[in-house]
Image: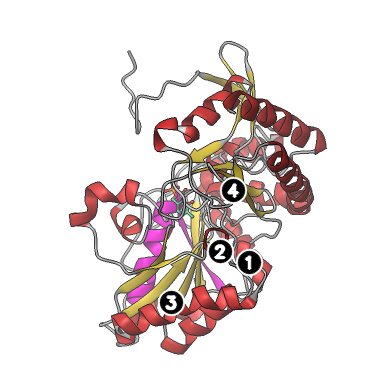
Amino acid sequence: MSHLFYQSRLARPELDRAEGIYMWDTSGKRYLDGSSGAMVSNIGHSNPAVLAAMRAQMEKSTFGYRLHFQTEASEALAAKTAELSPPGLSKVFFVSGGSEAVESTIKLARQYALAKGEAQRFKVISRMPSYHGATLGALAVTGYAPMSAPFDPMLMRMPKIPAPRAYLDGLDIDDVATGHHYADMLEQKIRDEGPETVLAFIVEPVGGASTGALVPPAGYMSRIREICDRYGVLLIHDEVMSGGGRTGKFWGAEHWQVVPDIICISKGFGGGYVPLGAMIAREDIVEAVLDMGGFVHGHTYAGNPLACAAGLAVLDEVERQGMIGNADRMGARLKSRLEALMQRFPFIGDVRGKGLLLAFELVSDRDSMAPLPKDLNAHARLVDLAYDRGLIIYSRRTRGGLEGDHFLVCPPMIVGEDGIDEIIEGLGAALEDFA
Ligand code: PLP
């Protein structure tokens, strides 16, 4: 009997070791990590350079409390992160995960409003569906009812607008009018709420688990930026999953050349080697908050030297091995192979995503995009069938806040052509079993 518990009674094999894109359980069975865990192990498992950097840091120190010491590792990672960030976003605040990163963005935004004498601004608008984390603050801006429903009475009421689900609404994702149609819902919401009360808008540039790699339509991201500017609303990009290179650019939003006021990143930032995340903010925002007396927020493990040394080595490896270019190339290859699976299996309703942040969705009818019946339990069944064949994929039973099943196929950014072939072979066989 295990003393551990997580979300459910799901029993999984015991992990023995992992290397590159593969993982082995204690029975010796090999799995291809086709989702990089939860889109975390971006540079693959057991990267020798990262392990060496961690070992070297451990020989020196593993923890130095941030209010007692500065460390070379945290300074170096902050400098590198700022260098990779859009112009003007040069201040870095470390955390240990995605939810902490999102909480930090909300609190920084709020304190900035106070510093500017705009105490009436407190509402953070977000999208339905979206995922921004499991802690109560991050959950309040998350648009994913299965996670938030039990806590509804305890959550701040934060306004939501629909995410741009063009594929469900029958709109053309390449048409700027589509992007404006959805973006203008933000302006309407700001007006309805009272612009003077709106603090920020938070958005995943390329959607993650709750939308299944939703890509914004043409014109959407830049229109959102304009609307935020018009009403003095801060734009927060949640790049917890899309940041770090997976989409084929370091930041997902680089695909649309849009610069936010605050960004957060986690997952691939620590690459599965350490719990690590960061908030990166405009310098004037941070300075205004520090001038006011300080940023009233922080977590004990923030900026610890071991996590920062690992994070720095992860970024170095991404660069040294040209992984972002590889994510772009291999992503295009994987996407076209997934689209080919659509020809074979009429119950695949949509394939979408950017780079190696890709998803497909199952439907009962492609014309109407009606979902599969809930009792089919497709999201869990297909994952198990793939698992049997030694392929790990990630699924959620949700679709734009509606019923539906989508699956993320997001192998590490070091995947090669053989790895892509193996994923498609395993997935094709699992889909045959499922059909
Ligand atoms: N934001 C986004 C976009 C995410 O995808 C996630 C996790 O999936 C989070 C925030 C929360 O991150 P964590 O699970 O590390 O707290």
For badge 4, the amino acid type reads Arg
Q: Position of residue 145 (x, y in %)?
A: 33, 51
The alpha-carbon separation of the residues under discs 3 and 2 comes to 16 Å
Residue 121 counted in the magenta span: no
Q: Dot 3: few (<14), some (14–19), or many (≥20) neighbours within 10 Å?
A: many
Q: Tell which residue pokes out farthest to the left in this image.
A: 153
The answer to whether residue 406 is above or below residue 109 is above
Q: Tell which residue pokes out farthest to the right in this image.
A: 417
Q: Position of residue 144 (x, y in %)?
A: 37, 53
| Occupied quadrant, residue 375 | top left
Q: SS of the residue at dot 4?
A: loop
Identify the mark at residue 166; answer none if there is no mark.
2
What residue sits 33% from the left and 46% below the top? 146
| Quadrant showing the N terminus | top left
Q: Is residue 114 visible?
A: no
- The label nearer to you, 1 versus 3, is 1
- Start-end of magenta stretch: 88-112
User: Which of these two is toward me, 241 or 85?
Assistant: 241
Q: Which residue is mark 1?
A: 173
Residue 108 counted in the magenta span: yes
Among numbered discs 1 and 3, the one appearing first in the sequence: 1
For badge 2, the amino acid type reads Ala
The alpha-carbon separation of the residues under discs 4 and 1 comes to 17 Å
For badge 3, the amino acid type reads Leu
Among numbered discs 2 and 1, the one appearing first in the sequence: 2
Q: How is the structure coloured here? A: secondary structure
Identify the mark at residue 366; answer none if there is no mark.
4
